[in-house]
Image (cartoon, helix red, strand yellow):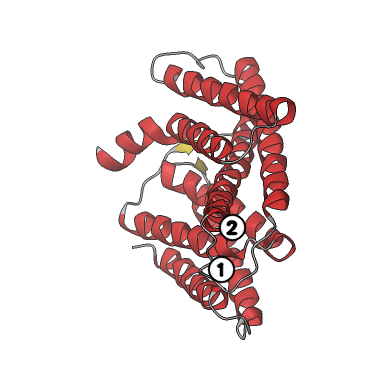
Amino acid sequence: MDYWAFIVATFYLIGGGLAVNILFNRARPFHKWLIGSTIIALSTHVIWLYQNIFLINGQSLPILNVVSLIGFLIALLSAIMSKRLNTGVLLPVIFGFNIMNFIAVAHFPSHFITHLEIHPAIGSHILLALLAYAILSIASLLALQLAYINYRLKNHKRPLTMTNMPPLMTLEKILFQFILIGFILLSCTLITGFIFLDDMFAQGNAHKAILSIIAWIVYAILLWGHYTKGWRGQLIVYTTIIASSLLTLAYFGSRFVREIILN
């Protein structure tokens, strides 16, 4: 039993609970407590990642460890930008995702040993892939927030929370900044994959490359449509979610079936 995983999950649970309280309380009495619990959660998360990924005989990168690493990147970036961009509404969702992942880690321990120190080029490819997915996942969450604000405005309804939401145009601008950064990182991921991976289209890996390329095309069309044709509203929300879903299937589809379902 991975008790350290439960410790990290506990601090994320505290942070998520405080974040929810702040969303429905204009006075925000627990804001400093939220900052403290978030720092502790992220710090313990880093310790867990170091203990469970960087082993003596190599790096352990089963699907749950990879998801945990991505979850850390998403939580870190979201926490950093939450005050400036008023995206604190996303923190409970992100923290909740990390809690569920750590519960899964505690109940389904697994190892997938690799040796990135022998192949640093492949390590750079993996790092680019993780950063691309983390950035584009945040873009998906921002797209959902955009859809929520747009829905409340169209139906002349006040937000359910007491937290001030960012202006619609500001949020849309931020969304496309994240999509553009993620698109560039995804492009670099594909390029390094073509250069450094000999088996990129081999049996068992071909679907990952194909789905990633399709997702890249969807993001490219989305960026082109927004900046040249002025696409906005529900169209960009749906397209962002579709592209993110394709990327998720590419990154984790077969590994989830093999490592979690079939074990």
- Pick whichever of labels 2 and 1 is earlier in the sequence: 1
Q: Tag 2: residue type?
A: Ala
Q: Secondary structure under badge 2? A: helix
The mark found on residue 255 in the picture is none
**Amino acid carrying mark 1 in the image:** Ala
Given residues 179 and 147, the one toward you in this image is: 147
Q: Position of residue 82 (x, y in %)?
A: 67, 62
Residue receiving disc 2:
75
* Residue 29 against residue 88 in the figure, above or below: below
Vertical placement of 213 versus 157: above or below? above
Q: Which residue is mark 1?
A: 41
Q: Quadrant of residue 63?
A: top left
Where residue 110 appears, as percent x and y from the top left, is: 36, 46
Question: Mark 2 packing: few (<14 Cα in 10 Å), some, or many (20+)?
Answer: many
Quadrant for the C terminus, please.
Answer: top left
Residue toward you, 139 or 128: 139
Question: Is residue 263 in view?
Answer: no
